[in-house]
Protein backbone atom coordinates (compact mmCIF):
# COMPACT_ATOMS: atom_id res chain seq x y z
CA UNK A 1 0.00 0.00 0.00
CA UNK A 2 1.23 3.50 -0.85
CA UNK A 3 0.02 6.63 0.91
CA UNK A 4 0.74 10.22 -0.01
CA UNK A 5 1.68 12.70 2.67
CA UNK A 6 -1.16 15.18 2.91
CA UNK A 7 0.70 18.03 4.60
CA UNK A 8 4.25 19.03 5.32
CA UNK A 9 3.72 18.73 9.07
CA UNK A 10 2.13 15.31 8.77
CA UNK A 11 4.88 14.06 6.50
CA UNK A 12 7.59 15.27 8.81
CA UNK A 13 6.03 13.67 11.87
CA UNK A 14 5.54 10.31 10.19
CA UNK A 15 8.98 10.42 8.61
CA UNK A 16 10.64 11.09 11.93
CA UNK A 17 8.89 8.10 13.47
CA UNK A 18 10.00 5.97 10.54
CA UNK A 19 13.59 7.00 11.00
CA UNK A 20 13.96 9.53 8.19
CA UNK A 21 13.78 13.30 8.48
CA UNK A 22 12.65 15.05 5.32
CA UNK A 23 11.95 18.51 6.69
CA UNK A 24 14.15 21.04 4.92
CA UNK A 25 14.94 18.60 2.08
CA UNK A 26 14.85 19.47 -1.62
CA UNK A 27 14.02 15.98 -2.82
CA UNK A 28 11.06 13.65 -3.06
CA UNK A 29 10.91 10.80 -0.56
CA UNK A 30 9.32 7.40 -0.16
CA UNK A 31 9.53 5.84 3.28
CA UNK A 32 8.11 2.78 4.95
CA UNK A 33 6.67 2.10 8.34
CA UNK A 34 9.22 0.60 10.68
CA UNK A 35 9.34 -3.08 11.58
CA UNK A 36 11.18 -5.80 13.48
CA UNK A 37 12.66 -9.06 12.21
CA UNK A 38 15.17 -11.70 13.21
CA UNK A 39 18.54 -11.30 11.55
CA UNK A 40 22.27 -11.53 12.00
CA UNK A 41 23.38 -7.90 12.11
CA UNK A 42 27.06 -8.58 11.43
CA UNK A 43 26.12 -11.16 8.80
CA UNK A 44 23.88 -8.65 7.02
CA UNK A 45 26.68 -6.10 7.04
CA UNK A 46 29.16 -8.56 5.56
CA UNK A 47 26.69 -9.75 2.91
CA UNK A 48 25.80 -6.16 1.93
CA UNK A 49 29.45 -5.31 1.35
CA UNK A 50 30.01 -8.57 -0.52
CA UNK A 51 27.04 -7.73 -2.78
CA UNK A 52 28.52 -4.30 -3.59
CA UNK A 53 26.23 -2.07 -1.55
CA UNK A 54 27.50 0.98 0.28
CA UNK A 55 27.31 0.46 4.02
CA UNK A 56 27.28 3.45 6.34
CA UNK A 57 27.90 2.60 10.01
CA UNK A 58 27.79 2.86 12.86
CA UNK A 59 24.78 5.08 13.47
CA UNK A 60 23.50 5.91 16.94
CA UNK A 61 19.83 6.59 16.17
CA UNK A 62 20.31 9.11 13.31
CA UNK A 63 23.76 10.36 14.27
CA UNK A 64 27.19 8.93 13.56
CA UNK A 65 28.51 10.45 16.79
CA UNK A 66 28.02 8.27 19.86
CA UNK A 67 25.97 9.60 22.75
CA UNK A 68 25.49 8.49 26.32
CA UNK A 69 27.92 6.09 27.98
CA UNK A 70 29.02 2.49 27.49
CA UNK A 71 29.28 0.85 30.91
CA UNK A 72 32.07 -1.66 31.48
CA UNK A 73 31.61 -5.07 33.02
CA UNK A 74 28.07 -5.97 31.91
CA UNK A 75 28.78 -9.01 29.74
CA UNK A 76 25.11 -9.95 29.33
CA UNK A 77 24.28 -6.53 27.88
CA UNK A 78 27.35 -6.61 25.62
CA UNK A 79 26.09 -9.89 24.21
CA UNK A 80 22.51 -8.66 23.82
CA UNK A 81 23.18 -5.21 22.41
CA UNK A 82 26.61 -5.43 20.82
CA UNK A 83 30.04 -4.21 21.89
CA UNK A 84 29.28 -0.49 21.67
CA UNK A 85 25.75 -0.06 22.94
CA UNK A 86 25.14 3.13 24.87
CA UNK A 87 23.07 4.03 27.91
CA UNK A 88 21.36 7.34 27.15
CA UNK A 89 19.67 7.70 30.53
CA UNK A 90 17.56 5.90 33.10
CA UNK A 91 14.77 6.57 35.58
CA UNK A 92 13.73 5.30 38.97
CA UNK A 93 10.07 5.64 40.01
CA UNK A 94 8.94 6.48 43.52
CA UNK A 95 5.28 6.27 42.49
CA UNK A 96 3.60 5.66 39.14
CA UNK A 97 4.04 9.34 38.26
CA UNK A 98 6.91 10.67 40.39
CA UNK A 99 10.41 9.69 39.34
CA UNK A 100 14.08 10.60 39.18
CA UNK A 101 15.55 10.89 35.69
CA UNK A 102 19.30 10.31 35.35
CA UNK A 103 20.57 12.02 32.18
CA UNK A 104 23.94 11.02 30.71
CA UNK A 105 24.15 13.38 27.74
CA UNK A 106 25.96 16.36 29.27
CA UNK A 107 29.52 16.85 30.43
CA UNK A 108 28.41 15.53 33.82
CA UNK A 109 25.47 13.30 34.68
CA UNK A 110 22.46 15.17 35.98
CA UNK A 111 19.47 14.03 37.99
CA UNK A 112 16.05 15.63 37.64
CA UNK A 113 12.87 15.18 39.67
CA UNK A 114 9.63 14.89 37.71
CA UNK A 115 5.93 14.38 38.26
CA UNK A 116 4.06 13.06 35.21
CA UNK A 117 0.85 14.70 36.41
CA UNK A 118 2.35 17.99 35.26
CA UNK A 119 2.02 21.45 36.70
CA UNK A 120 3.00 24.99 35.75
CA UNK A 121 3.93 25.78 39.33
CA UNK A 122 6.62 23.19 39.91
CA UNK A 123 6.26 19.84 41.63
CA UNK A 124 3.65 19.71 44.40
CA UNK A 125 5.29 19.45 47.80
CA UNK A 126 3.38 16.26 48.57
CA UNK A 127 4.91 14.65 45.45
CA UNK A 128 8.51 15.04 46.62
CA UNK A 129 9.93 11.66 47.69
CA UNK A 130 11.35 11.23 51.20
CA UNK A 131 14.98 12.19 51.63
CA UNK A 132 16.03 8.64 52.52
CA UNK A 133 14.58 7.28 49.27
CA UNK A 134 16.43 9.94 47.27
CA UNK A 135 19.69 9.17 49.08
CA UNK A 136 19.30 5.48 48.28
CA UNK A 137 18.92 6.22 44.55
CA UNK A 138 22.02 8.43 44.46
CA UNK A 139 24.12 5.82 46.25
CA UNK A 140 22.86 3.11 43.88
CA UNK A 141 23.63 5.07 40.72
CA UNK A 142 26.91 6.77 41.68
CA UNK A 143 30.10 6.05 43.57
CA UNK A 144 29.12 8.60 46.17
CA UNK A 145 29.23 8.75 49.96
CA UNK A 146 26.01 8.89 51.93
CA UNK A 147 26.95 12.41 53.08
CA UNK A 148 27.30 13.69 49.52
CA UNK A 149 24.19 11.81 48.43
CA UNK A 150 22.29 13.59 51.19
CA UNK A 151 23.47 16.96 49.84
CA UNK A 152 22.20 16.08 46.37
CA UNK A 153 18.89 14.93 47.81
CA UNK A 154 18.54 18.10 49.85
CA UNK A 155 19.29 20.14 46.72
CA UNK A 156 16.40 18.54 44.87
CA UNK A 157 14.01 18.92 47.79
CA UNK A 158 14.96 22.58 48.29
CA UNK A 159 14.41 23.38 44.61
CA UNK A 160 11.02 21.66 44.73
CA UNK A 161 10.06 23.67 47.82
CA UNK A 162 11.03 26.86 45.99
CA UNK A 163 8.70 25.99 43.11
CA UNK A 164 11.39 25.18 40.53
CA UNK A 165 9.73 23.68 37.45
CA UNK A 166 12.29 20.87 37.14
CA UNK A 167 14.50 20.38 40.20
CA UNK A 168 17.86 19.17 38.90
CA UNK A 169 21.39 18.64 40.22
CA UNK A 170 24.63 17.76 38.46
CA UNK A 171 26.67 14.93 39.96
CA UNK A 172 30.47 15.06 39.87
CA UNK A 173 31.11 11.55 41.27
CA UNK A 174 31.58 8.56 38.89
CA UNK A 175 28.51 6.82 37.53
CA UNK A 176 27.92 3.26 38.76
CA UNK A 177 25.46 1.98 36.18
CA UNK A 178 26.35 -1.68 36.80
CA UNK A 179 25.42 -1.19 40.46
CA UNK A 180 22.14 0.51 39.56
CA UNK A 181 21.23 -2.05 36.91
CA UNK A 182 22.13 -4.97 39.17
CA UNK A 183 19.79 -3.63 41.84
CA UNK A 184 17.01 -3.24 39.27
CA UNK A 185 17.50 -6.80 38.01
CA UNK A 186 17.31 -8.17 41.55
CA UNK A 187 14.02 -6.37 42.23
CA UNK A 188 12.06 -6.87 39.05
CA UNK A 189 9.53 -9.61 38.45
CA UNK A 190 8.98 -8.75 34.78
CA UNK A 191 10.60 -6.64 32.07
CA UNK A 192 9.22 -5.05 28.89
CA UNK A 193 11.21 -3.88 25.87
CA UNK A 194 10.25 -1.54 23.04
CA UNK A 195 10.63 -2.11 19.31
CA UNK A 196 13.60 -0.30 17.78
CA UNK A 197 12.39 0.29 14.21
CA UNK A 198 15.83 0.58 12.59
CA UNK A 199 17.18 3.45 14.66
CA UNK A 200 18.35 1.41 17.63
CA UNK A 201 16.50 3.26 20.39
CA UNK A 202 15.47 0.64 22.96
CA UNK A 203 13.47 1.45 26.09
CA UNK A 204 13.48 -1.21 28.80
CA UNK A 205 10.85 -1.04 31.53
CA UNK A 206 11.25 -3.04 34.74
CA UNK A 207 8.17 -4.07 36.70
CA UNK A 208 7.75 -5.31 40.24
CA UNK A 209 4.46 -7.15 40.76
CA UNK A 210 3.03 -5.37 37.72
CA UNK A 211 4.16 -1.89 38.80
CA UNK A 212 6.74 0.07 36.81
CA UNK A 213 9.67 1.08 38.98
CA UNK A 214 12.60 1.67 36.58
CA UNK A 215 13.28 2.39 32.93
CA UNK A 216 16.51 2.48 30.93
CA UNK A 217 17.02 4.09 27.51
CA UNK A 218 19.59 2.13 25.50
CA UNK A 219 20.97 2.95 22.07
CA UNK A 220 22.25 0.09 19.95
CA UNK A 221 24.20 0.54 16.76
CA UNK A 222 22.46 0.72 13.40
CA UNK A 223 23.64 0.79 9.79
CA UNK A 224 22.38 2.05 6.45
CA UNK A 225 22.66 -0.23 3.41
CA UNK A 226 22.60 1.98 0.31
CA UNK A 227 21.76 1.16 -3.33
CA UNK A 228 22.02 3.94 -5.92
CA UNK A 229 20.17 3.87 -9.23
CA UNK A 230 21.08 7.06 -11.08
CA UNK A 231 19.59 9.92 -9.08
CA UNK A 232 17.63 7.55 -6.84
CA UNK A 233 18.99 6.47 -3.47
CA UNK A 234 17.47 3.39 -1.81
CA UNK A 235 18.27 2.92 1.88
CA UNK A 236 17.69 0.01 4.23
CA UNK A 237 18.26 1.06 7.85
CA UNK A 238 18.82 -1.85 10.24
CA UNK A 239 19.77 -1.94 13.92
CA UNK A 240 21.35 -4.66 16.06
CA UNK A 241 18.01 -5.68 17.56
CA UNK A 242 16.41 -6.36 14.18
CA UNK A 243 14.52 -3.10 13.77
CA UNK A 244 14.39 -1.69 10.24
CA UNK A 245 12.92 1.01 8.04
CA UNK A 246 13.20 1.80 4.32
CA UNK A 247 13.63 5.06 2.44
CA UNK A 248 14.06 6.27 -1.14
CA UNK A 249 15.30 9.74 -2.04
CA UNK A 250 14.86 10.99 -5.59
CA UNK A 251 14.50 14.26 -7.52
CA UNK A 252 11.68 16.61 -6.55
CA UNK A 253 8.32 15.48 -7.92
CA UNK A 254 9.62 12.23 -9.38
CA UNK A 255 7.63 9.05 -8.75
CA UNK A 256 8.38 5.35 -9.12
CA UNK A 257 5.84 2.60 -9.84
CA UNK A 258 5.12 0.80 -6.61
CA UNK A 259 6.00 -2.65 -7.93
CA UNK A 260 9.34 -1.30 -9.16
CA UNK A 261 10.55 0.10 -5.84
CA UNK A 262 9.19 -2.86 -3.91
CA UNK A 263 11.14 -5.09 -6.30
CA UNK A 264 14.36 -3.18 -5.60
CA UNK A 265 13.91 -3.56 -1.84
CA UNK A 266 13.05 -7.25 -2.20
CA UNK A 267 16.33 -7.79 -4.07
CA UNK A 268 18.23 -5.84 -1.41
CA UNK A 269 16.70 -7.96 1.36
CA UNK A 270 17.55 -11.15 -0.47
CA UNK A 271 21.10 -10.02 -1.21
CA UNK A 272 21.85 -9.30 2.44
CA UNK A 273 20.21 -12.43 3.85
CA UNK A 274 16.89 -11.00 5.07
CA UNK A 275 13.47 -12.45 4.07
CA UNK A 276 12.38 -10.55 0.93
CA UNK A 277 8.70 -11.21 1.56
CA UNK A 278 8.95 -8.77 4.48
CA UNK A 279 8.75 -5.93 1.96
CA UNK A 280 5.37 -7.09 0.65
CA UNK A 281 3.59 -6.33 3.92
CA UNK A 282 4.91 -2.80 4.39
CA UNK A 283 3.00 0.44 3.86
CA UNK A 284 4.92 3.25 2.17
CA UNK A 285 4.35 6.99 2.34
CA UNK A 286 5.32 9.48 -0.38
CA UNK A 287 6.10 13.18 -0.41
CA UNK A 288 7.02 14.96 -3.69
CA UNK A 289 8.91 17.60 -1.70
CA UNK A 290 8.51 19.74 1.39
CA UNK A 291 8.79 23.04 -0.44
Image (cartoon, rainbow, N blue to C red):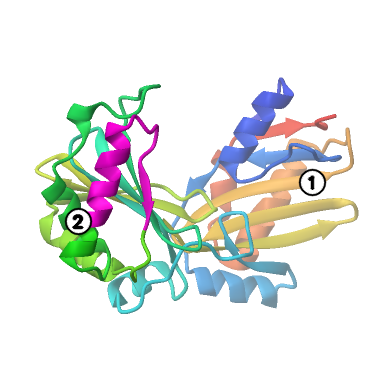
- Residue 217 vs residue 276, the one in the foreground: 217
Q: Which of marks 2 and 1 is in front?
A: 2
Residue 39 percent location from the top left of the image: 47, 64
Highlighted range, magenta: 150-170
Q: Is residue 160 magenta?
A: yes
Q: Is residue 199 magenta?
A: no
Residue 140 in view of the camera: no
Residue 161 in view of the camera: yes
The residue carrying mark 1 is 249
Q: In this view, does 81 lie above or below 30?
A: below
- Residue 273 vs residue 73, the one in the foreground: 73
Q: In this view, does 96 lie above or below 182?
A: above
Q: Would you identify the image quadrant in which residue 211 lies?
A: top left
Quadrant placement of the C terminus: top right
The residue carrying mark 2 is 150
Q: Would you identify the image quadrant in which residue 148 lies?
A: bottom left
In primary-sequence order, the first of circles 2 and 1 is: 2
Helix, strand, or loop for circle 2? Answer: helix
Residue 202 percent location from the top left of the image: 41, 53
Q: For the image shown, how many numbered marks are present on the structure? A: 2
**x 29%, y 35%: residue:** 160
- Residue 259 vs residue 49, the one in the foreground: 49
Distance, label 2 to label 1, CA atoms, is 54 Å
Residue 43 percent location from the top left of the image: 53, 74
Q: How crowded is mark 1: few (under 14 residues within 10 Å), some or many (20 or more)?
A: many
Q: Residues within 10 Å of mark 2 (few under 14, many from 20)?
A: some
**x 79%, y 37%: residue:** 257
In the image, taking residue 214 as reference, residue 278 lies left or right, namely right
Helix, strand, or loop for circle 1? Answer: strand
Amino acid sequence: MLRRAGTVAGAGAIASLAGCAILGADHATYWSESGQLDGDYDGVMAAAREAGYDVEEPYYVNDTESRGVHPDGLTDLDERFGPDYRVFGFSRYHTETVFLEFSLTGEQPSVGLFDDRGTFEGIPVDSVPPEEWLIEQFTLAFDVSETDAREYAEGLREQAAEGTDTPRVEVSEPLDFPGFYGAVESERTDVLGSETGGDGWYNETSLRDGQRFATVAFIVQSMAVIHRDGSRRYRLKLDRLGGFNLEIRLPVGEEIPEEEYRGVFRRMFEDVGLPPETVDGLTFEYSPSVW
